[in-house]
Amino acid sequence: MSIEALNRLAERLRELLGERVLDIVIDCDEATLVVNGRDIVTVAEQLRDAPDLAFKLLLDVSGIDYQTYGQADWRTHDATTSGFSRGVSRAQESVDNGAFPGRFGVAYHLLSVAHNLRLRVKVYLADEPPRLPSVVDVFPSANWYEREAFDLYGILFEGHPDLRRILTDYGFIGHPFRKDFPLEGYVEVRYDAEKGRVVYQPVSIENRVLVPRVIRNDGRPGH
Amino acid sequence: MPEIRNMTLNFGPQHPAAHGVLRLILEMDGEVIERADPHIGLLHRATEKLAESKPFNQSIGYMDRLDYVSMMCNEHAYVMAIERLLGITPPVRAQYIRVMFDEITRVLNHLMWLGAHGLDIGAMTVFLYCFREREDLMDCYEAVSGTRMHATYYRPGGVYRDLPERMPQYEASKFRSAAEVKDLNANRQGSMLDFIEDFANRFPACVDEYETLLTDNRIWKQRTVDIGIVTPERALALGFTGPMLRGSGIAWDMRKKQPYEVYADLDFDIPVGTNGDCYDRYLVRIEEMRQSAHIIAQCVKWLKANPGPVIIDDHKLTPPTRGEMKGDMESLIHHFKLFTEGYCVPAGEVYAAVEHPKGEFGIWLVSDGANKPYRLKARAPGFAHLSAMNELATGHMLADVVAIIGTMDIVFGEIDR
């Protein structure tokens, strides 16, 4: 979308939603609308029903965990514009996470087929466990996406008709996409010939980090 | 008087018509479906979590394994997301190559779908016909990337390498005589583009062949017409995209409405259905194959006339050539850094979507400025389609469930991720 179209959209959103708009970010030719979790159902309804917006297609709902945002294994600040800076400190340097009003976020990607518009609506959640009203009544397609976000991040969608796990195993414990859930998990399954069935046991593998996570702010594209 | 109760039937996960590992719990009243509850996740590999622990380029191969019958389209969405965050544009030749392979992938996907859908509801021959043409396209994948399925061919900034000058040929063996091999190699004498051109020219006749088997076939129509009807309003509400949406009569195609790469310069049409049933979606996909062949032919023509670079030459993002590496210290350092550490992507978030053969495949990429994604979310079209299973199947007979699974073009790689 062109920048004029995005600005027009932002203006229209402010007019339509008034105080419910916390922020509108325009970046990478996309508009992101930030709203409060408790307003999400009303906002979704308004976006869907406004005839000049008609965001009738909810493409995606996904959770995100900002717990380790901006943390790197190495941290570097300066170098020449043509060379590479060297990673020096191995310490996990924690940077301020205050950029986000909550540990968890939920992003809704909306599409307007009638007006050829796209919009991302974002909600930040500070509670533990994170809670958010469900938009299933507004967008039936949210049903499985919310189940997925619940399964992977433990976000509780209040008013969801059937908030079961969807992708993980029957009887799975934990929410695997949270940043504090290890990549290799806690349990593994194997077939036990003596017992004649599949058994669960603690994981026998260890995660090796082959490439450290590096954040460089030193003259690369986009900096 | 005997007590009559509903029966609960477990369908899959090991069932040939389940298209992979779908487990359906069907509540049946006699042979009529009362409720269908799909259980998914049996192929869940946490691709999105794995991507968070790897440099950007190392996850391109994972994208192939999402929807494993339309490999390059998945890669396309992923590299496009990275490119948008980096603010780079691939050379025009790379864009044409991508579009050509996207369309080849679309044909591959629709052939697989047509063959499997036909087989599921009783048409054996069409499966064999489809796989005959798939073989040629798989050879194109192999010629360009070295693998027949999981290509890892697209890179941020372009494609891995230019199209080969020579199309690989069959060799005689104890299973294939020299005469047979000569026949098979007849259209492989020139470059890869010559081979693809030949394919694009003869493919519409192949589609005619499939259509003679199915389009007016009485059994085919009995199994698909008025099965799984979706109204346009309902299709939007359920999050349908791609042929599932167009089958219901909504002319929405990313390639036309929000063109990416060079689709804006190409000539093609968007077929739409009227009834929104399985038969209309079949017709839509058949026509899409014809349109894809038309797009492929246009790309071949352009690519033949316009040689040039296929990847940007910023060696902070793309590897230098072997020759440069041998003679130049700076290039050696770039090569080393790129393959050990990768590159850092500016902080931000982006949603890049492509018109995947199954619908809209999108990648939501959040970067915090590191050399690995902070969060990657693949928006798989099949996930939304399968979530409508209950609505589509309720009231139909058990055998129609198979037709509905077929018409959704289900692939578990992308649904379970």
Image (spheres, coloured by chain):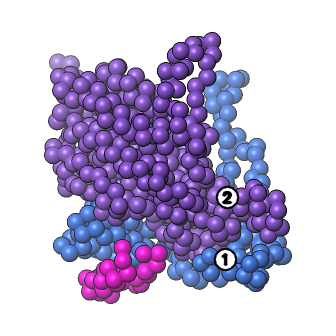
Check disc 2 and report the residue beneath it.
Answer: B54
Q: Position of residue B257 (x, y in %)?
A: 30, 63
Q: How many marks?
A: 2
Q: Are marks 1 and 2 in contact (CB under 8 Å)?
A: no
Tell me how far mark 1 sits from mark 2, CA to CA.
19 Å
The three-letter code of the residue at mark 1 reads Arg
Residue shown at 47%/37% (left/top)?
Answer: B195
Find numbered disc 2 in the image and state the secondary structure of the residue it sits on. Answer: loop
Q: Magenta segment range?
A: A1-29
What residue sits 58% from the left and 60% below the top?
A: B309
Which residue is rendered at x = 63% and y = 61% of the image? Answer: B56
Q: Is residue A17 magenta?
A: yes
> Does B1 appear above or below B410?
above
Q: Give the image location of residue B191, x and y in percent.
A: 53, 40
Badge 1 element: loop
Q: The chain coloured blue carries which letter?
A: A
Residue A160 lies left or right of residue B218; in this view the side is right
Q: Position of residue B273 (x, y in %)?
A: 19, 45
Q: Locate residue B415, reporting x and y percent.
A: 45, 46
- Residue A15 located within the stretch drawn in magenta: yes
Q: Chain of mark 2?
A: B
Chain identifier matching the purple colour in the rendered picture? B
Q: Amino acid at mark 2?
A: Lys
> Which residue is the site of mark 1?
A220
B71 or A22: which is nearer to us? B71
